[in-house]
Amino acid sequence: MVTLDETADAELQADISEEATAFGQLEDCMITVVYDTPDAAGTGTGTGTGGGGGEPVVFVYLTYGTYADACRARDAMHGKFFGDSGVRVVAQLVDADEVARRKKK
């Protein structure tokens, strides 16, 4: 299971980076954690966990040298189960500006 403690672990980042290099030239692997907090309706922030129970949501940003490499990674990883936790990966392409904003936080 991916937990907040594991996200701080360099081993997790190394494992993800190793797997991600199978799809092309990986330039960066960044892991961030966002807490799903209740919105005005009490339903969460829309980060994917719903409920707003203060649960950590782990985001992994992979930066590739080419768009084609990024697409290969997305296609291969989307829907895959991560670890023993049964957590399903939701992979999508995001704008480089979004990644830069996350790095500043």
Image: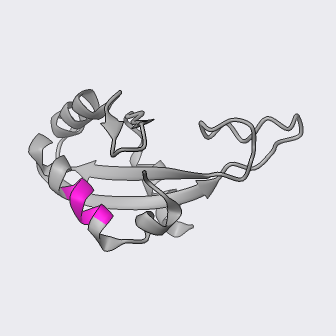
The quarter holding residue 89 reads top left
Residue 9 x, y percent position in the rendering: 37, 71
Q: Is residue 48 left or right of residue 27?
A: right
Residue 57 x, y percent position in the rendering: 56, 50
Closer-to-camera residue (48/6): 6
Which quarter of the figure is the C terminus placed in? Answer: bottom right
Decide: is 39 above or below 56. above
Q: Is residue 97 left or right of residue 76?
A: right
Judged from this view, the residue extending furthest toward the right is 40
Question: Residue drawn 37% across and 51% down?
Answer: 61
Closer-to-camera residue (84/69): 84
| Colour style of the rendered protein structure | one colour
Residue 73 x, y percent position in the rendering: 22, 37
**Residue 59 located within the stretch drawn in magenta:** no
Question: Residue drawn 42% across and 65% down?
Answer: 6
**Residue 16 located within the stretch drawn in magenta:** yes
Decide: is 41 above or below 95. above
Q: Is residue 55 left or right of residue 97?
A: right
Decide: is 94 above or below 62. above
For the stretch drawn in magenta, what is the main secondary structure? Answer: helix
Residue 1 x, y percent position in the rendering: 42, 51
Question: Residue drawn 26% across and 60% down?
Answer: 28
Question: Residue drawn 17% across and 33% down?
Answer: 68
Magenta region: which residues?
A: 12-17
The quarter holding residue 26 reads bottom left
The quarter holding residue 50 reads top right
